[in-house]
Amino acid sequence: MERRFFLRCLGCSFLASAMLQSDFFPEILGGLKSAEAYSLTKNLSSVEARYYKKLPEGGVECGICPRHCRVTDLERGYCGTRENRANVYHTLVYGLACSMNIDPIEKKPLFHFYPGTTAFSLATAGCNVNCKFCQNWDISQSRPEQTDNVDLPPKEVIAICRNQNLPTIAYTYSEPTIFYEYMYDIAELGRSNSIRSVMISNGYMETEPLKNLLPVLNAVKVDLKSIREDYYKNIVGGELKPVLDRIIQIKKSGTWLELVYLIVPTLNDTPEEFRELAGWVKTNLGTDTPLHFSRFYPQYLLKNLPPTPQKTLETAYQICRETGLEYVYLGNLPGHPAESTYCPQCGKILIERKGYRIYQNNIKGNRCYNCQRNIPGLF
């Protein structure tokens, strides 16, 4: 019974996402027909967490994210996935995937990272912030006891990728920071098996864990939710500065980086904010860092707001292009010209996209086919 349930959910989940696109992906759906089945489990993991310290007065202090939760015996941190047991901190979600899918890499979105390829995407329960617009709140705001979990150790993840011929693993949907140990071990094992890893993150992680993680990752996409501290405080439930610092850290490491900014009507959608954002990206990351603006749809705690008007997205695009950013994209607008990649030098279309499907790719060896301008990314 559990086995059939899982297979049904896996297929339905992908179909739901595919329906949002302009076209289906028969090659991927065909792959899922032979997907392997795993049983659900009610057991939680008891793997010792990394990056914490024992406090002299008793209890532990978590060091995985800027919250630095101080946790007494038998209590958990903010994320609900790390528990103090007799002053030993444990992760409860190691090897327990609650959501899995095969996604186009464009869905992450990563537009300058092996376009047209697929990624085995997975998540566990939990998150270290509480965005009022979260589209995956049913898993990100749940404790691991409240989600349907599959016992999926790192070696099984690698086996799926090898059996399904999937070149990349994406840690996504919820916040990978809270399942750091699981992510790290998969990525390290994947690296030795020539399988790439990408992290889709809110960037709310501490310096040292990120420093040690980056060598086993191939790319990171960060959701920069606003350029204003009050937005992070009131809408996200986090802090802006650590996120900006981590973005700069990723860029300096040389790991491929792309940013997404979800435009929420009336909350982070003014031209002044777009100018601040564009200026910050230009100054700190350079004009060649891809920046995606994404359209908001009413979700979770913000069902009272309308979807982002197309004109607002186009205003953000125009401001960033005028500031000098070379790779600006608009998302959740299938068929819009700003889904595609253009050469910043000659203006020729390099990668034509509609939804998550690619219709042409004219990048040859990281260069524009027409003027030979170097195009940043991994192609």
Image (cartoon, grey):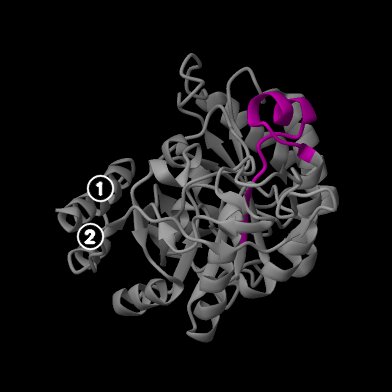
Label 2 environment density (alpha carbons within 10 Å; few <14, some 14–19, many ≥20): some
CB within 8 Å, label 1 to label 2: yes
Which residue is pictured at 41% across the width and 44% down the height? Answer: 145
Question: Of the numbered discs in the image, which one, if any, rests on residue 29?
Answer: 2
Which residue is pictured at 54% across the width and 57% down the height? Answer: 110
Q: Considering only order in the chain, which callout, 2 or 1, is on the residue closer to the N terminus? A: 1
Residue 60 position within the rendered picture, expressed as x and y whole percent measured from the top left = 74, 52
Regarding residue 112, the answer to whether it shows in the image is no
- In this rendering, is residue 153 above or below 133? below
Is label 2 in a helix, a strand or a loop?
helix
Label 1 environment density (alpha carbons within 10 Å; few <14, some 14–19, many ≥20): some
- In this rendering, is residue 264 above or below 374? above
Q: Amino acid at mark 2?
A: Leu
Residue 281 position within the rendered picture, expressed as x and y whole percent measured from the top left = 77, 47
Residue 81 position within the rendered picture, expressed as x and y whole percent measured from the top left = 55, 48
The alpha-carbon separation of the residues under discs 1 and 2 comes to: 8 Å
On screen, residue 97 versus residue 314, left or right, reads: left
Most extreme residue toward the bottom is: 192
Disc 1: which residue: 15
